[in-house]
Image (spheres, helix red, strand yellow):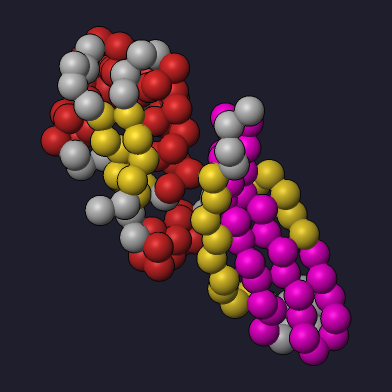
Amino acid sequence: MEQTVFESVRYAGVCQDCGAELECWGVQALVDGRLRWDVESACATCGFAVAMCDGELPAERRDQMVSEHGPARLEVSAPVKSVVLMRVLRAELGLAVTDARAGLRRVLDGDCSGTLPEMERLARALRKAGIAAVAARP
């Protein structure tokens, strides 16, 4: 079983019970090959608390996560079978053929980046397909 990879962010929200500022913690995790987005919130004013599990990572939180932790990059080692890499990109990211070609170029140029769990998910899929790949921070 592969190790769980995760990153977290802390941010403010509004309490749905009293309207006060709500403290929120969000975690993106790679668990059993799937990306998860879990959030816990607690209101210091009224005590309201909630946990939401296995949602979609909001773009704003993703941007915050990349900003706070820095982007993780997908790195591949030669030899790289372009067709195999494009097949993995299409399967994992739902890309069209033309987009997979652009994705291939980004990967080979070292420009494929995102959150650490996102890049680790791609790296694992590539390794499973026989391509040496790692998710790393520069």
Relative image position of residue 128 (x, y in whole percent): 44, 17
Residue 119, x across and y down, in percent: 39, 39
Q: Is residue 63 above or below residue 80?
A: below
Question: At x 20% / y 42%, what residue is drawn?
Answer: 111
The answer to which of 70 and 23 lies nearer the viewer is 70
Please report the residue visible at 72 percent of the width from the left and 86 percent of the height from the top.
20
Residue 34 in the magenta stretch? The answer is yes
Residue positioned 74% across, 54% down in the render: 52
Main secondary structure found in the magenta portion? strand
Can I make out residue 2 in this image? yes
In the picture, measured across the screen, residue 103 lies left or right of residue 88, that is: left
Picture quadrant of residue 126: top left
Q: Quadrant of the N terminus?
A: top right
Find the magenta span and give its range: 21-50
38 horizontally vs 125: left or right: right
What residue is shown at x 61% (from left), y 61% (from top)? 26
In this rendering, the answer to whether 98 lies above or below 70 is above
1 drawn magenta: no
Q: Is residue 79 above or below residue 102?
A: above
